[in-house]
Image (spheres, rainbow, N blue to C red):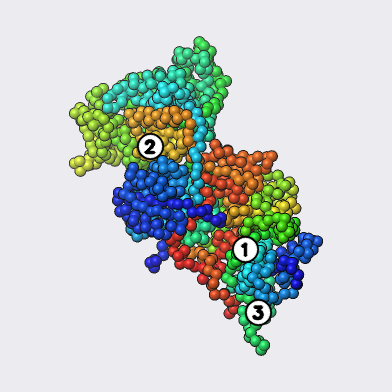
């Protein structure tokens, strides 16, 4: 190994974090040990402090940098993901390049996960030694600055995506809003009333949809999907497939004659949740934005056997175009917001609730459509036969949620939605309503008041998880009814409650393709499949990937107010980035030592960001620093050792390994040959 | 003796190829004679250890040491010649990195002796086994004893320069001799201590004329199983594990030029800590598979990875020997 | 040292997944064996086999390598490259007499603090069973000369 450079002056700072660290680690012991044993590695001062991250703690470091001429700083405290920036900024204030300061995680990796004080202290010393030896090889780095493309891609045209798009567009920047269905609106467009105020969902949503549709700063791309994403924050290149609508948007006026004349009708599994029909040329609903219909080619008679063309014949503007092809658009954007929403839990999976087998068991979405005045029953609440009014309705909460067999999490909206259903049933049919719940969860503004209101309206509440919904009557009064078998845990008794109609409040699930979508955009999912936030509390709309944000139910179940807030929050983050005009990139980059590169081309297939290119004339490889993302794979791969990676160089890691093993017993035992 | 500077060359644990390679420089050897007095070169002229011991420390200007340190005799001579030499050069792969004798570091001494004296390939009808000392009427005869592992010269004594290669190429030896003579004549300066001389700083590919492309290897094969080998295309690209990408340049890519894969005798490139690790990562990088089963199938094409990656460099690698060799 | 053997394990973690999994384990106060010392890399793809060799030569009894799940790499697909290196490295280390079980590759996402803790516990246990590696320092020059061994 090369000789170490002249030892720079290192300061070590060990944080108590109140008692978070010092409760388990002998902080003073670590401090003294570093002072004594790491002096050979350049440590000139070692201190401890109650809260290093406090302004006083930071000032302590700044003072030492100035007065003791520190050239490197090591802070043993919490995870670098929390306070690396804090301490690097403090160092910078004192005139030290920020990249000469390193954090050692002795909280997350030691005091919070271990209990034995002696062992925890020993581990802390090892980690500090590793970082001290490493930091000696740290070099001063400057952040790279690249311009930010002011355009934004918003994926998903539900309420969260619409909100995000409008905020950014109103801020004066261009947005590409991509939605894979023919219209924006998302799930909210399917609902009748919204809790707890009982506003008409469409009445509050459609103005936003229209605004998004006509906004000069929004390019609306419905019936479209993102196919590929490349680039990085500030400079993404996105390919979008605009699926063939078979309707020329330039010519179509949205008059609806084609829909009227289309002879073919199919069950609408998406918008009408399978309880209503639509034509083969259709707009999902009357207020759809954009107004242009699409032809559902797999079901279209013309596409199937070359006959019909009724829509084409009657279209007054010749807008029908059966020859239309999928179109691929390339757009360049600086930031991306994913508001891809959720799927609903498939109620068939809970076989004991009989959905799909017992006709009068409905899902919550079917019930929403049924309540909707523009829905298949024109707002009439009826049994599956479409005419009989129920006299008793049972609403079952937590279907597929809070259940080890399905999803452990709470879907967060079902209690309120179920209460809303109770109110609607009461209001429209006067029927008796039973609510079967495990726990009532009504924490947000005016939610519990709504619960009180529904209680006052006479809805009956049974606390207990429903065991079964059956039509097998055991008594006369059960005949012809659906019987809900449940343990009423408040009275400690099994009950059988006959009802006419059952509504299953089904939970939310991550989109079936959320993993693939995540991979497309370079973000990851948590174990249950929701997108992972950069920080669940402090950075809930950011992801680990710079420039890719998440909003709405993409990161977990949310109600409308929360989704809207998230859409706005993500937009604020994007506007913040756009207004900075350029983005600072971590200067962790690979570069080729051209004198040592032999042009073997081993590394040439390694970079997914196309940062590596081969220069034929010189027979060497080069790395484009703007495209390099700093993963270091090529650094580790170069057989000639000709690629260096800043921030994580071989010398730094080698030294860290040496330092970390200073206290290893094999080392001190001195086995030798 | 004349007042010409003194030259020495010694052969420790190695095959002797390095000694021959010095003669391969042809008439350049006359320059050596013209400029140096041969103080000690057992293979070329008679000399006794005590003659060397009698010299003043630093009396020899240049010693080319070839071979690793396997016996106590090797070690003794290494210390002795270090003391007596101004410039000690680790000459050839054995001295710089252990080379093939270093591969014995994968086996314990007992196994080495067993293989050398008692296997089917050995004709030893009386089952004779060497011992370190043996009593005869005239007194006690001794043989050098083996160390548990072979060491490189630098692992035993301070080394001034390293000259890699198995053996070093004649044109490189000639160039180094020229350089030393020029230094003697005040026309050139010695490189910094610790430098590798007689070689390049890049790798074999740098000097290899074969065409190279982005590599996607779906199978590793032995060279005899690739028929015919494309004479113009990178050998690794044809699936043959060629060590060229990780091996120091200087040989003018001698093997790949004649249709054989580089086996790595010039050792690691400048500044590399572990030669084998470079090959592991290089070969793994070009394996074109994602599933463990597929990867395994491709890697099966390298049946002896330790031998493939450390044929020359084992004794100088980070691990230096197998647990079998040193664990008791 | 106490009589019970406590292995020293060096871990190399990816900045985006497993290092954050360690953070998550900490935040959730999940207790695990203290034998592992983690070194942060930006990606498991940065893992140079040299790091593993150096750790073993320097006194580690085992080496843990962690990265994002296949398909979830922050850098798209670099963890596959880590996987390939890991597999060839284990084969090579076998030739050095290093049991393959001493080198472990674990995929852990940022959310999987619990999984990481469990994997660390299992690994520590496994290495504990294998016993110390105690790679020699190769520094002791004045060792008594080994004699030629006489076979029986």
Tell me the subunit letter for badge 1.
Answer: B
Q: Where, quadrant-wise, is the C terminus of chain A in this rendering?
A: bottom right
Task: Please state the horizontal and vertical placement of residue B64, each as a whole percent of the image.
Answer: 69, 65
Residue hosting label 1:
B159
**Quarter of the image where one finds residue B156:** bottom right
| Left or right of residue B153: residue A292 | left
Residue at (54%, 26%) from the top-left corner? A329
Task: Please state the horizontal and vertical placement of residue C91, each as a whole percent of the image.
Answer: 56, 57
Q: Secondary structure at mark 2?
A: loop
User: B260 or A434, which lies in front?
Assistant: B260
Looking at the image, do the residues carrying marks 2 and 1 touch, with CB atoms under 8 Å apart? no
Residue at (46%, 38%) from the top-left corner? A545
Q: Is B44 rendered above or below residue A646?
A: below
Asked whether the residues under marks 1 and 3 belong to the same chain, the reply is yes
Q: Is A328 rendered above or below residue A612?
A: above
Q: Is A319 rendered above or below residue B171?
A: above
User: Dot 1: few (<14), some (14–19), or many (≥20) neighbours within 10 Å?
Assistant: many
Viewer can see residue B86: yes
| Left or right of residue A451: residue A87 | right
Residue at (46%, 46%) from the top-left corner? A100
The mark closer to the camera, 1 or 3, is 1
Task: Please state the horizontal and vertical placement of residue A85, each as a whole percent of the image.
Answer: 41, 42
Q: Secondary structure at mark 3?
A: loop
Residue hosting label 3:
B127
Residue hosting label 2:
A539
């Amino acid at each position: 190994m090369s000789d170490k450079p002249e030892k720079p002056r290192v300061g070590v700072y060990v944080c108590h974090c109140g008692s978070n660290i010092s409760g388990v680690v002998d902080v003073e012991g670590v401090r003294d040990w570093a002072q004594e044993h790491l002096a050979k590695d350049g440590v000139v001062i070692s201190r401890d402090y109650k809260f290093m991250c406090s302004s006083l703690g930071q000032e302590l470091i700044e003072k030492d940098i100035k007065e003791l001429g520190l050239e490197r700083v090591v802070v043993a405290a919490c995870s670098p993901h929390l306070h690396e920036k804090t301490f690097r900024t403090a160092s910078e204030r004192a005139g030290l390049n920020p990249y000469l300061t390193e954090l050692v995680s002795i909280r997350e990796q030691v005091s919070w996960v271990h209990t034995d004080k002696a062992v925890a202290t020993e581990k802390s010393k090892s980690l500090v030694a590793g970082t001290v030896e490493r930091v000696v090889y740290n070099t001063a780095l400057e952040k790279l600055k690249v311009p930010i493309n002011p355009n934004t891609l918003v994926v998903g045209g539900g309420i969260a995506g619409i909100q995000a798009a409008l905020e950014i567009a109103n801020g004066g920047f261009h947005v590409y809003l991509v939605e894979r269905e023919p219209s924006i609106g998302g799930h909210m467009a399917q609902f009748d009333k919204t809790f707890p105020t009982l506003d008409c969902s469409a009445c509050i949503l459609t103005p936003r949809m229209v605004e998004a549709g006509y906004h000069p700063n929004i390019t609306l791309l419905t019936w479209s999907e993102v196919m590929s994403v490349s680039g990085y924050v500030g400079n993404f290149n996105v390919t979008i497939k605009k699926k063939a609508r078979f309707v020329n948007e330039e010519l179509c006026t949205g008059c609806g004659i084609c829909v009227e004349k289309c002879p073919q009708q199919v069950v609408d599994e998406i918008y009408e949740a399978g309880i209503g029909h639509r034509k083969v040329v259709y707009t999902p609903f009357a207020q759809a934005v954009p107004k242009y219909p699409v032809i559902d080619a797999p079901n279209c008679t013309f596409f199937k056997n070359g006959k019909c063309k009724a829509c084409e014949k009657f279209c007054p503007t010749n807008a029908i175009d059966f020859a239309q092809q999928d179109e691929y658009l390339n757009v360049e954007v600086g930031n991306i917001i994913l508001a891809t929403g959720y799927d609903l839990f498939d109620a068939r999976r809970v076989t004991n609730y009989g959905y799909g087998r017992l006709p009068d068991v409905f899902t919550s979405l079917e019930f929403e459509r049924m309540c909707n005045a523009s829905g298949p029953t024109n707002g009439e609440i009826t049994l599956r036969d479409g005419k009989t009014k129920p006299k008793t309705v049972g609403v079952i909460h937590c279907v597929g949620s809070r259940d080890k067999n399905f999803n452990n999490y709470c879907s967060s909206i079902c209690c309120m939605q179920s209460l809303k259903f109770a109110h609607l049933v009461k209001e429209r049919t006067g029927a008796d309503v039973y609510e079967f719940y495990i726990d009532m969860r009504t924490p947000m503004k005016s939610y519990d008041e709504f619960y009180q209101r529904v209680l006052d309206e006479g809805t009956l509440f049974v606390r207990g998880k429903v065991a079964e919904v059956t039509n097998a009557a055991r008594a006369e009064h059960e005949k012809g009814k659906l019987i809900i078998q449940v343990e009423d845990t408040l009275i400690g008794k099994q009950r059988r409650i006959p009802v006419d109609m059952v509504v299953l409040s089904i939970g939310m699930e991550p989109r079936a393709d959320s993993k693939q979508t995540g991979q497309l955009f370079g973000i990851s999912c948590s174990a249950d499949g929701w997108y992972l936030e950069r920080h669940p509390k402090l950075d809930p709309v950011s992801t680990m990937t710079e420039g890719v944000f998440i909003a709405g139910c993409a990161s977990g179940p949310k109600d409308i107010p929360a989704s809207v807030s998230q859409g706005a929050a993500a937009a604020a983050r994007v506007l913040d980035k756009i207004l900075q005009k350029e983005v600072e990139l971590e200067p962790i980059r690979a570069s080729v030592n051209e004198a040592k590169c032999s042009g073997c081309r081993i590394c040439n297939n390694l970079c997914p960001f196309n940062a590596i290119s081969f220069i034929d004339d010189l027979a060497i490889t080069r790395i484009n620093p703007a495209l390099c993302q700093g993963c270091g794979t090529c650094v580790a791969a170069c057989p000639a050792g000709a690629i260096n990676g800043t921030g994580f160089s071989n010398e730094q890691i080698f030294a860290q390994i040496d330092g970390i093993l200073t206290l290893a017993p094999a080392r001190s035992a001195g086995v030798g040959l | 003796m004349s007042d010409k500077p003194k030259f020495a060359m010694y052969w420790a644990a190695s095959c002797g190829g390095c000694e021959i390679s010095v003669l391969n420089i042809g008439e350049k050897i006359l320059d050596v004679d013209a400029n140096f007095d041969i103080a000690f070169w057992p293979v070329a002229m008679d000399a006794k250890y005590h003659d060397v011991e009698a010299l003043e420390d630093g009396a020899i200007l240049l010693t080319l040491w070839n071979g690793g340190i396997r016996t106590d005799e090797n070690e003794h001579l290494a210390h002795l010649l270090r003391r007596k030499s101004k410039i000690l050069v680790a000459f050839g792969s054995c001295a710089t990195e252990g080379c093939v004798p270093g591969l014995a570091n994968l086996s314990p001494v007992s196994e080495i002796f067993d293989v050398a004296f008692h296997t089917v390939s050995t004709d030893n009808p009386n089952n004779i086994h060497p011992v370190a000392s043996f009593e005869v009427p005239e007194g006690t005869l001794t043989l050098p004893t083996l160390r548990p592992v072979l060491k490189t010269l630098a692992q035993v004594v301070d080394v001034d320069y390293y000259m890699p290669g198995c053996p070093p190429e004649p044109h490189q030896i000639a160039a180094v001799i020229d350089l030393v003579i020029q230094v003697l004549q005040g026309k050139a300066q010695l490189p910094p201590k610790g430098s590798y001389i007689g070689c390049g700083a890049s790798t074999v590919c740098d000097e290899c004329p074969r065409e190279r492309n982005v590599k996607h290897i779906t199978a590793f094969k032995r060279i005899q199983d690739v028929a015919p080998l494309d004479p113009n295309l990178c050998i690794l690209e044809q699936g043959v594990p060629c060590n060229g990408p990780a091996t120091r340049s200087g040989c003018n890519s001698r093997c790949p030029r004649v249709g054989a894969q580089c086996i790595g005798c010039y050792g690691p490139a400048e500044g590399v800590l572990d030669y084998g690790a470079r090959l592991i990562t290089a070969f793994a990088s070009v394996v074109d598979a994602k599933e463990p089963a597929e990867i395994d199938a491709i890697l099966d094409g390298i049946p002896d990875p330790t031998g493939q990656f450390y044929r020359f460099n084992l004794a100088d690698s980070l691990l230096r020997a197998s647990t079998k060799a040193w664990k008791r | 040292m106490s009589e019970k053997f406590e292995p020293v394990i060096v871990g190399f973690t990816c900045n985006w997944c497993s290092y954050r999994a360690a953070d998550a384990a900490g935040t959730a106060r999940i207790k695990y064996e203290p034998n592992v010392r983690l070194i942060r890399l930006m990606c498991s793809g940065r893992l140079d086999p040299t790091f593993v060799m150096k750790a073993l030569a320097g006194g580690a009894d085992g080496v843990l390598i962690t990265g994002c799940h296949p398909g979830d790499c922050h850098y798209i697909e670099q963890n596959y490259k880590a996987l390939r290196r890991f597999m060839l490295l284990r084969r090579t280390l076998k030739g050095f007499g290093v049991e393959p079980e001493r080198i472990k590759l674990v995929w852990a996402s940022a959310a999987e603090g619990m999984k990481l803790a469990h994997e660390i516990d299992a690994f520590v246990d496994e290495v504990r069973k294998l016993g110390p590696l105690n790679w020699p320092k190769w520094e002791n020059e004045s060792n008594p000369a080994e004699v030629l061994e006489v076979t029986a």
